[in-house]
Image (cartoon, helix red, strand yellow):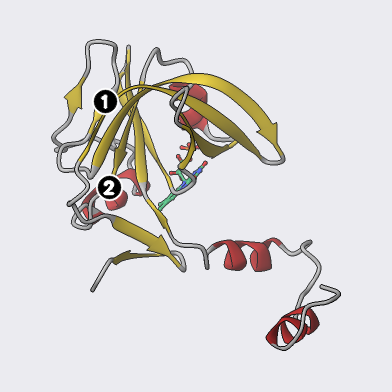
Amino acid sequence: MAGMSGSASVAEASLTPAGDTADLRSAFACFPSGVAAVCARLDSGPVGMLVSSFTSVSLQPALASISVMESSRTWARLRRARRLGISFLAHDQHHVCTQFTSQPLDRFAGLDIAQTTDGAVLLPDATAWLDCSVHDEVPAGDHVIVLLRIHALHGRPAASPLVFHGSEFHQLSA
Ligand SMILES: Cc1cc2nc3c(=O)[nH]c(=O)nc-3n(C[C@H](O)[C@H](O)[C@H](O)COP(=O)(O)O)c2cc1C
């Protein structure tokens, strides 16, 4: 912080060590993101989880990443899939979040889904779809950074996204 002035010195005075996970969670929650459903068809049927950690990584080759809890039982299953479907949720897809996070865990009950021949599962009405495979997995603390190779995609740039910020769902407004 040396050399910074004005409001930066006020921020320095309020910095606390990063050991408290509640503080860390709260600071991370200040960074808005979209919400993506990561889904694939396994022998048992469709399997999926929500992530807010989707990040674009590279154009050539086409790569993206997600960060998943290393203890995630869903990821332990999904990582074996030949292809993973990524659907960026639209502003009116709260019901998908409710369904994916509530018990019992039939996350797809009553949901309309589409599937590629290689088993990527995609949710209609999303703002974009990516057909991916796992390119690499990098352990990172209590998470695993998953690099995804993107094989095919379709975007709907005019569609309005669901936004996750402050641990709540929002919509963009003008
Ligand atoms: C909006 C939202 C964003 C989430 N983002 C992530 C994420 O980026 N990484 C992750 O591992 N879990 C994330 N989760 C949690 C998982 O979706 C879900 O809790 C997890 O799959 C359940 O644990 P299980 O995999 O052991 O069943 C998120 C949940 C919500 C509601």
Q: Nearer the viewer, residue 46 or 123?
A: 123
In the picture, measured across the screen, residue 67 lies left or right of residue 89, that is: right
Quarter of the figure with the C terminus? bottom left
Q: Kindly state the secondary structure of the residue where label 1 is placed.
A: strand
Image coords of residue 10 (percent x, y):
74, 87
- 172 vs 76: above or below: below
Q: Is residue 117 left or right of residue 135?
A: left
Residue at mark 1: C-beta within 8 A of ligand 1: no
* Distance between mark 1 and mark 2 Cα atoms: 14 Å
Pointer 2: what residue?
89
Residue type at mark 1?
A: Val
Q: Is residue 12 visible?
A: yes
Q: Position of residue 165 (x, y in %)?
A: 43, 65
Q: Tell me the tag on residue 121.
A: 1
- Taking depth in this image into account, of 80 and 118 the one nearest to the observer is 118
Residue for point 25% across, 47% down: 96
